[in-house]
Image (cartoon, rainbow, N blue to C red):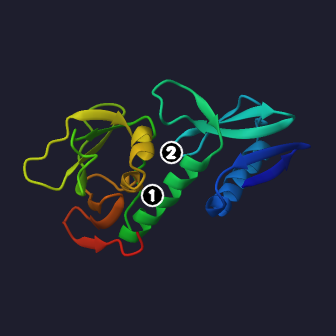
Amino acid sequence: MTATVTLDGRTVVAVCPDELDVAARSLLAKLAELHARGPKLHPGSLVDFGWAPLRIDEQDGEWIVCEPDFSRDDVAFTRGVAVTLRVLRDQTRIVELGRAKPEATRHDDGVLVASDLWDAPKSIAIRGKPAKKHDSGWSFVPDEDGAVATEWMRAGRLAIARPGLSSVLMLPQDWSASFEGDRVLAIYDPDMNKIVAEAS
């Protein structure tokens, strides 16, 4: 689907699946607010949208909202906002479930994963203290003894490779989560109180 808003006679388009319609309209309302406040948006404008920057490109007389190509490590944008809106929707739901204070992970922040994470039927994620700049503090490993996360990857790539795992990335330091496949089973606060993710 496409959601649109008009800014000074220009049609601004956000492309995403129907299920993200409400989020897309909220995004466009935010862009209209920023445009009215100034400086005016234009093709090439970058807008920070929490998880990632969005860029306005011009195509066939319309302004298209584009998100980063999360499959790449270099700077590239692609038409549409589906991944950005899905990630923020899912992360917001998990933070609200835990009544936690959000601590954002950017798409270009690093996460650590175990090399055998991808085939594991169950896994766990733990957010520790970041070791350096652009380190989220997150580690993802199979739910088994001795599992170690040693491979660095961007959080944006994780959102493509295993979308369900990226849903916990807004939980703060010392929180953790358990998964079955891509489904969140539970999240745990710093005191290890278990909160079951029934709606996941």
Give the side of residue 101 with respect to residue 37, left or right: left
On screen, 61 above or below 198? Answer: above
Taking depth in this image into account, of 60 and 187 the one nearest to the observer is 60
Residue 48 shows in this picture: yes
- Asked which quadrant contains residue 8, the reply is top right
Task: Looking at the image, tell me whether mark 1 or mark 2 is earlier in sequence order.
Answer: 2
Give the side of residue 188 with respect to residue 133, left or right: left
- Badge 1 element: helix
Could you tell me the amino acid type at mark 1? Gln
Residue 54 shows in this picture: no
Residue that lies at the very extreme toward the right in this rendered image: 9
Q: Could you tell me if the residues under marks 1 and 2 are in contact, i.e. CB atoms within 8 Å?
A: yes
On screen, 188 above or below 54? Answer: below
- Asked which quadrant contains residue 135, the reply is top left
In the image, what residue occupies the spot 45% across and 57% down? Answer: 91
In the image, what residue occupies the spot 45% across and 44% down? Answer: 160
Could you tell me the amino acid type at mark 2? Trp
- Badge 2 element: loop
Name the spot of residue 132 as percent of width and height, x first: 28, 31
Q: For the residues marked 1 and 2, what is the alpha-carbon distance in whole angstroms?
A: 10 Å
Residue that lies at the very extreme toward the left in this rendered image: 146
On screen, 62 above or below 162? Answer: above
In the image, what residue occupies the spot 24% across and 43% down? Answer: 129
Name the spot of residue 73 as percent of width and height, x first: 45, 27
* Quadrant location of the C terminus in the rendered image: bottom left
Q: Which residue is mark 1?
A: 91
* Quadrant location of the N terminus in the rendered image: bottom right
Number of marks in the rendered image: 2
Residue that lies at the very extreme toward the front in this rendered image: 119
Q: Which residue is mark 2?
A: 51
Name the spot of residue 79 as percent of width and height, x first: 67, 38
Name the spot of residue 134 as percent of width and height, x first: 37, 33
